[in-house]
Image (cartoon, rainbow, N blue to C red):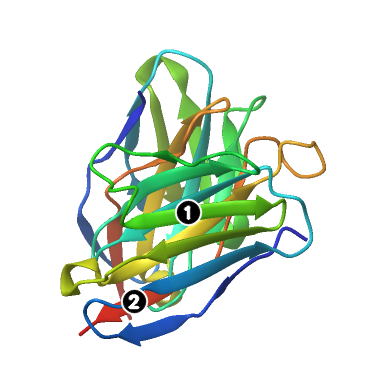
Amino acid sequence: AQSVSQHNHHVILSEAASLELGCNYSYGGTVNLFWYVQYPGQHLQLLLKYFSGDPLVKGIKGFEAEFIKSKFSFNLRKPSVQWSDTAEYFCAVNALNNDMRFGAGTRLTVKP
Amino acid sequence: GAVVSQHPSRVICKSGTSVKIECRSLDFQATTMFWYRQFPKQSLMLMATSNEGSKATYEQGVEKDKFLINHASLTLSTLTVTSAHPEDSSFYICSARDLAGVLSYNEQFFGPGTRLTVL
């Protein structure tokens, strides 16, 4: 079964700093990859997803992620974070017709 | 499109009682629904997968007699926590997947979650 690891448990940045959150997965077959955000007290929202095609995926709110197949990675990036980006970020993976597995999550705190 | 609702959003119950949580896909037919639980400051853990009209598939370590799942229609799945205890207090989240091709294939759409507190 596939598994997902997120390297950073808690990231603290100042506004305007650049962000990169790591995500690696273990599964040898074709996968779909997702990044979700959970703002305090709110439900999961999809930031972006990769199914196929261009490995550089652009999502909402200025986020992007790059799928590097050889590294089994799908890192999330944003060039300049804002205070409103403070949230929990989850990477998720599912193989076709299989269950979705979530990483442990990365808490991002952006200081104003 | 692709809206999933859950009811109730919050529930507080006494130990030993049963609680039912509903998950509905509002504008699409969900061939598969998933139930997750999330403990504070932790990730989502898949509890079970249910396909419409068939028995749910439970993850290892999840008691199927305690967490009863019914997926009787293509738009509704219910999770019943039977004889709830304080350790069952958690945030329960459902998601739905449409494999009919109307929505993104293999993508799951998440409900807002239900916070269960067992006293």
Whether residue A104 appears in this view of the structure is yes
Dot 1 amino acid type: Ile
Label 1 element class: strand
Query: Of tags 2 and 1, which is closer to the observer?
Result: 1
Q: Disc 2 versus disc 1: distance between alpha carbons?
A: 16 Å
Is residue A6 rendered to the left or right of residue B99? left
Does B7 appear above or below B27?
Answer: below
Label 2 element class: strand
Q: Position of residue A93 (x, y in %)?
A: 45, 35
Q: Are the residues under badges 2 and 1 in a single subunit?
A: yes
Q: Chain of mark 1?
A: B
- Find residue B116 and name its label: 2
Q: At 65% across and 64% down in the image, what residue appears?
A: B24
Instruction: Name the image quarter holding residue A88.
Output: bottom left
Q: At 25% across and 64% down in the image, what residue appears?
A: B39
Q: Position of residue A24 (x, y in %)?
A: 33, 31
Question: Callout 2 environment at 10 Å: few (<14), some (14 to 19), or many (20+)?
Answer: many
Whether residue B113 appears in this view of the structure is no
Q: At 43% across and 42% down in the image, what residue appears?
A: A92
Does A17 appear above or below A28?
Answer: below
Q: Position of residue B109 (x, y in %)?
A: 60, 54
Q: Which residue is at the front of the view, A88 or B66?
A: B66
* Mark earlier in primary sequence (2, 1): 1
- Find residue B69 and name its label: 1
